[in-house]
Image (cartoon, grey):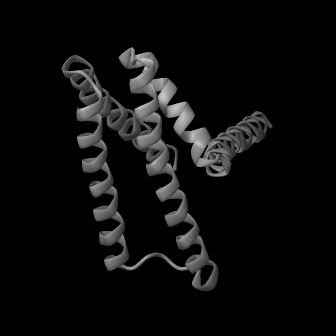
Amino acid sequence: MKKLLVIALALFTLTGVAQERKKQRADRKGGSELRKQMTPNEIADLKAKKLTLSLDLTDAQQKKVHSVILNQAKENESLRKERKAVDGEKKEKPSKDEIVKMQNHRLDQQIEMKREMKTILTAEQYSKFEKMKPRQHKKRARRGKKHDENR
């Protein structure tokens, strides 16, 4: 009888933990959906303000950074809409050539952004800006590892 009670208790506990993990995953998806609903101008405003806080930008620099980010956000939105229109027809994963093309485009954008930021920022601000990027990638890598562990 005790064994039966222990088994039942273990099953109920495991069920509760599994449901909790599913809820956490659903919450994470909500954030990305909200970001997709944001307009390019809202995205540019947020990113420019974050950079202003971390790099102590002047008003003129903030406006220039905002315009750079706005152009990039508009371009990304148009690419997303284009991709969504294509996905609506066939709903399959992109081919190897498409993936390479997207990655090349993303890297070209990063190079362009880096060049433009170099002209806008002072040497001290630019070095701080360069140091910010690796931290963001490390955070993403940590999140990816946690995500893989939860599966």
Q: Where is residue 37 in the image (x, y as percent from the top left)?
A: 68, 50
Please say whether residue 134 is visible from this viewpoint.
no
Pick out the residue farthest to the front. Answer: 60
Is 8 placed left or right of 131 in the picture?
Answer: right
Please say whether residue 91 is visible from this viewpoint.
yes
Q: How many marks?
A: 0
Answer with the quarter of the image where residue 107 lies: bottom left
At a point 64% along the width and 79% down the height, the residue shown is 88
Is 77 placed left or right of 109 in the picture?
Answer: right
Answer with the quarter of the image where residue 84 lies: bottom right
At a point 23% along the width and 42% down the height, the residue shown is 115
Pick out the residue farthest to the bottom. Answer: 90
Q: Position of residue 72 (x, y in %)?
A: 44, 50
| In this view, 100 is above or below 37 | below
| In this view, 135 is above or below 43 | above
| In this view, 142 is above or below 121 | below
Which of 132/3 is in front? 132
Which of 140/6 is in front? 140
Q: Where is residue 18 in the image (x, y as percent from the top left)?
A: 67, 44
| In this view, 96 is above or below 111 | below
Answer with the quarter of the image where residue 133 lies: top left
Quadrant position of the N terminus in the picture: top right
Which of 9/148 is in front? 148
Which of 139/101 is in front? 101
At a point 28% along the width and 26% down the height, the residue shown is 121
Q: Position of residue 39 (x, y in %)?
A: 63, 48
